[in-house]
Image (tube, coloured by chain):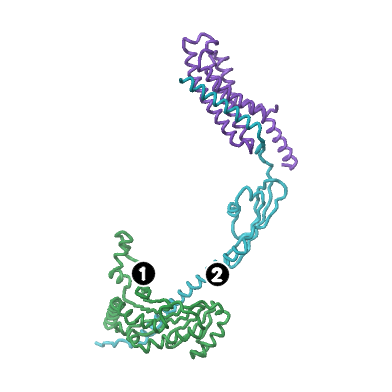
Chain colours: A cyan, B green, C purple
Amino acid sequence: MYDVLILSVMTVGILAMAVFSYKIFHSRAYPVGMVREIPTSQHGTLELEDVSDQEGTTQRIFYSDVWAKRHNQETAYGLFEKGKKRKIHLRFYGGGEPSFPEKPQGSPLEEKVTEHEEALKVYSKQVENLEKRLRRLEAERVQKFQEATEEEKPEAPQVVH
Amino acid sequence: MATFDESLVSVSGRIGHERDFTFYKNNVDLANLLQKELSATPKEITIDTDGDIEIEMSDVGTIIATPSAAIAVGWLTTPKVLSVQQEVEKFVNTLDRLAKLKGSFAVESYSIGLFFRFRPENPLNLLRERGFESSLQFIFSEKAPPDIASLKSSTTRSKGKFRDTIELEASSKDARVRYSRSGNGAGFDSYLTFVVAASLREMLEELKPFAEILLAAERGLRLSGLLSEMK
Amino acid sequence: MALESWLRVSLPALPVAFTVFGVWLYWGENPLPLLAPPLAFWGVVVLFYLFSHLDLPQGRNYAPFLTILASVFWAFAAITSHNLGKFVASKQYVGFTSVFGSKDFWYAYICAAASFVAGLLHFIRYEPLIMEQIKKDRERLGAQGV
C-alpha cells in the first residue's frame, strides 16, 4: 500500500516534469538581465544656482537623467545645501557628457493652488499682526493714561514735627 | 482711591465684514473721505505700512479701517460711564459710520471688548493665592516653582448667541484682564442691536468681584506707600 | 561550451564530486546512499539558475512549478537515501548488486535522475541562448565605451 502510494506520486511527478518541460521547450524564451552595466566611473562637476524669492530660497537643481534614474528626486535634492552657489563633484554613470534637464514644472492648476496657499499664509500673518497691534495699542493707551494720572496727583502733605 | 465703578476701562469694538478686495487700491481716497466725514484733522489720519487706515479720535480712541473690518480700540472710560446708554451709543455710532463709509459689505461678525489693567503689589503672588497655585501644582506635580515670571490664561465659552473670551495676563508689574464678546453678523440688525444685546453692564458685573480684589490690592499698596512717605 | 557555462554546471556539482572523490575514492566508503541527493540538488540549482535568467512569456508558470517539483524530488531522494544507507549498513547488503533489491535504492535514484535529467536537458537547450545574449550585451556595452 505504502509502496503503491509512493510509486504513484513519483510517477505523477515525473510525468508532470515531462509535461512542464515540453511546455517550456515550446514557448518563447528570452534571456534577460544577463550583463550588469558597470561602466568605469567618470567625475564631473555640477554647478548650483539658487533663486531667491520673497518667501525664502528655492533651488534650481540640475541633475543628470542617469542620476535621476538611480535615485529619486528627493534624494537628489537632499544632497544639496540650500542657498549657496557652489560646485559639487558628482560621479556620473553611463559615460559621456551628462544632460541637464530642467526641473519639471507643475501644471497650471498646481501653480494656482500654490499661489493660493501662499496668499492664505500672507493673509493669516496679516491678521495675526493686526491682533497683536490692537492689543499693544490698547495696553499702551491705558498704561499712558494711568502713568499720566499718577504724575498729576497732588503730593502727600508733609507732617512737620 | 478708585472703586470699581470709577476704575479705568478701555473699550474696543469691531465690525467684521466681507473682504473689500479694492481696499488697498482705494485706501487714500477712503482716508480722505473719513477725514471729512469723521471730522479728523490731517495729522490724526495715517496709512500704515500694511495699507490700513488709522485715525486717532479724541472721544472714542483709535479707529482702524482694514479690508475686512472696522475697528475702534482704546476708548478710555469707566464702568460708571458705560452704564449710560447715550455714551455707549456715541461709541457704537462712530464705528457704525466707519463701517458704512467703507462701503456696503455683508457684516460677518460683531465684537465688543473690555480691558482692565491693575497694578497691585505682587500680581503674580496674588493670583497664585487666588487659585493659580493649584493649577501650577497640578502641572508640576506638587512641586510648583516658587517664582514665576508671567502667567497667561485664556478661556472661551458660548453664551446664547455670543461667544465670550476672557484673557488674563500677569507679570511682576501688572495684571491685565480682557473680556470680549462676539456674535455672528447675521444674528443682529446693527451694531447697536448687538451691543445692547451683549449688555456691557452684565459683562462688568461678571468681572466686578475679580476686579475688586485686584483694586483692593492696589489700594493697599498705595496706602502703604503713602504711610511710608508720611513717616 | 564556454568557460562560464562550465563554471555554472561545475559549481552545483561539487557535492557530487565530493561524494565520488572524497567519500568513495579517498575514504573507500560506499557512496551509494550519499550520491542521490547531490545529483538531485544539482538539477534544482541549474533549473533555478536558468529560469532566473529567462523570461518565458507563454510558459511563465511552468518554470517555477518545474523547479518546485525538482526540489520535491530532491527531498524524496534525500529521505530514501537515508533508508538506503541503513540498508547498506545492514547484513542484507552483500555487494553492489544487492542494492537493486532495495526499494529505497530505486526511489532515491529515480527521483535523483528525474531532477538531474530535467536540469541537464534545460541547460543544454537554454544555456546557448543565454550565452548568446551575454555576448551581444557585452558587444553593445563595449561599443558604448563602458
Q: CA distance from mark 2 to mark 1?
A: 31 Å
Mark 1 residue crowding within 10 angstroms, few (<14) / some (14–19) / many (20+): few
Query: Residue A80 at x, y = what percent?
Result: 60, 55
Using the image, tell me which numbered label, if any, was put on residue B153: 1
Query: Residue A129 at x, y = what percent?
Result: 48, 73
Residue type for callout 2: Ala
Residue C24 in view here: yes
* Horizontal arrangement in the rendering, residue C10 relative to residue A146 (left or right): right
User: Residue A20 sits in which quadrant?
Assistant: top right
Task: Label 1, secondary structure: give it.
Answer: strand
Mark 2 residue crowding within 10 angstroms, few (<14) / some (14–19) / many (20+): few
The residue sitting at 44% across, 82% down in the picture is B72
Q: Is label 2 on the same chain as label 1? A: no
Q: Looking at this view, name the residue that lies furthest to the left.
A: A161
Using the image, tell me which numbered label, if any, was put on residue B32: none
Query: Residue B151 at x, y = what percent?
Result: 36, 69
Q: Quadrant of the N terminus of chain B?
A: bottom left
Q: Chain of mark 2?
A: A
Task: Label 2, secondary structure: give it.
Answer: helix
User: Residue B214 sits in which quadrant?
Assistant: bottom left
Residue B178 in view here: no
Are the residues tagged 2 and 1 within 8 Å (C-beta)?
no
How many numbered discs sit on the rendered protein?
2
Using the image, tell me which numbered label, if any, was put on residue A119: 2
Q: Chain of mark 1?
A: B
Q: Quadrant of the C terminus of chain B?
A: bottom left
Compared to residue C8, the image places residue B149 above or below, namely below
The residue sitting at 49% across, 16% down in the picture is C85
Nearer-the-camera pick, B20 or B9: B20
Residue type for callout 1: Ser
Nearer-the-camera pick, B121 or B84: B84
Query: Residue B175 at x, y = what percent?
Result: 35, 74
